[in-house]
Image (cartoon, helix red, strand yellow):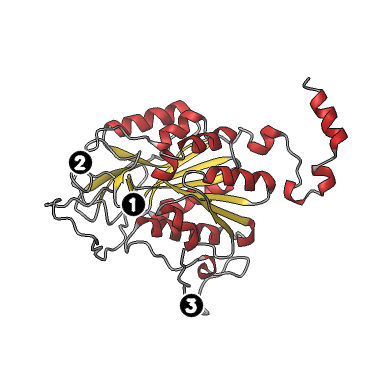
Amino acid sequence: MTFIVKPRLVHAGMPRNSLGLTLRDYEGAMSTLCAGCGHDSVSAALVQAFFELDMPQEQVAKMSGIGCSSKTPAYFLRGAHGINAVHGRMPAVATGAAGANRTLCAIGVSGDGDSLSIGLGQFAHAIRRNLDMLYVIENNGVYGLTKGQFSASADVGSAAKKGEVNQQPPIDPVLLALTLGAGFIARGFSGDKPQLVPLIKAAIRHRGFALVDVLSPCVTFNDHESSTKSYAHVRKHDVEMVHADFVPHAEPIVAESEAGKVTPVTLHDGARVLLRRVSQDYDASDRANAFTHLVECQARGEIPTGLLFFDEARADMHGIANTVDEPLATLPFAQLCPGAEALDKLQARWR
């Protein structure tokens, strides 16, 4: 993958955090995503969140799989550790990194295809283990990198690039995470930065698995009237296909929501989605209440946003496995591998 270096333009008046760093210091390479892509807004929110948390970049491990969303880690925290894993296998790499060094702040950026199709099993087991990490899903309902096939989160009735209508019900990552027992669940919109940044900050500080599902419009493949996220570009004459697509310039979609209110958001094609931000008196600690709220919003055609559920009492992966406080990566070899005699004694306990 080729990265374009972003010019580091820092003027004297830019605000600095307690580490003496500016927002520019938390940025990454130049984005190669389509102009107006919601994923770039997510990158900007991540930059803002880590800047405001005064987070040293060398304490962050950022990971992803394959897809448009998985390019995102290149665009923030240039000084952090980072790796692109195999398609759908990012949670396994994250488990290894977080297991070996519990002092690292692990963040995984994935897409609806990467997490809800080929990576569904790994996503589920990361939740089951309560892996201590921030897991961001940039959700647009489409495989944008491979030209607009349906993803597992595409809604019934949405049309693909060649006119095919999706008949399969979508997988809702928020409902799925709620069912599997995740301890922190939130949903945001890439264009609502005032809401998204604090959600990301809270998720980073949460001990255990923290899911932030972000509705992130795809400007290339969302021009369908019934779209609720982003869908394939529908051509009037699909017989006369061209080999190259023209991607017009588009501005990022921005809309601020109010607590307890429904905010209609108009996409680039004129379609609208309805975002309902949780009210001030919403009880995010009640799992049954959260499930009911999600189902009721779904029935009204609304997309609930905000902190939907959290549970601070559940032990994370290290607590469940009863590991030592010192990171495994820094333990001397003699402690990690005490020898054949110790192994024989351990195995004898299970005979």
Verify CB contact (< 8 Å) between mark 1 and mark 3: no
Helix, strand or loop for disc 2: loop
Q: Image point 30% across, 40% down: which residue?
A: 154
Among the 4 quarters of the image, the one containing residue 56: bottom right
Say whether residue 120 is left or right of residue 19: left
Q: Which residue is mark 2?
A: 164
Hey, what amino acid is under mark 3? Answer: Leu
**Disc 2 to disc 3, how far (Cα)?**
47 Å
- Three-letter code for the amino acid on which mark 2 is drawn: Glu
Q: CA distance from mark 1 to mark 2?
A: 16 Å
Q: Which mark is residue 121?
A: none
| Circle 2 crowding by C-alpha within 10 Å: few under 14, some 14–19, many from 20 | some
Q: Earlier in the sequence, mark 1 or mark 2?
A: 1
Q: Which residue is found at the position 49% from the left and 58% from the top?
A: 73
Q: Is residue 185 left or right of residue 292?
A: right
- Of all residues, the one furthest to the top in this rendering is 351
| Rendering coords of residue 247 (x, y %) | 25, 63
In the rendered image, residue 63, in percent from the top left (x then y), is placed at: 54, 52
Specify the amino acid type for callout 1.
Thr
Q: State the residue at coordinates (45%, 57%).
A: 72
Q: Between marks 1 and 3, how big is the CA–CA gap?
A: 34 Å
**Residue 119 or 341: which is nearer the viewer?**
341
Q: Badge 3 local density, few (<14 within 10 Å), some, or many (20+)?
A: few
Residue annotated with mark 3: 9
- Residue 79 shown left or right of residue 216 in the figure: right
Q: Name the image quarter holding residue 171.
A: top left
Instruction: Say which element carries label 1.
Output: loop
Q: Residue at x 20, y 41 (%)?
A: 164
Identify whether 212 is placed above or below 3: above
Image spot of residue 273 (x, y percent) = 26, 45
For marks 1 and 3, the one nearer the N-term is 3
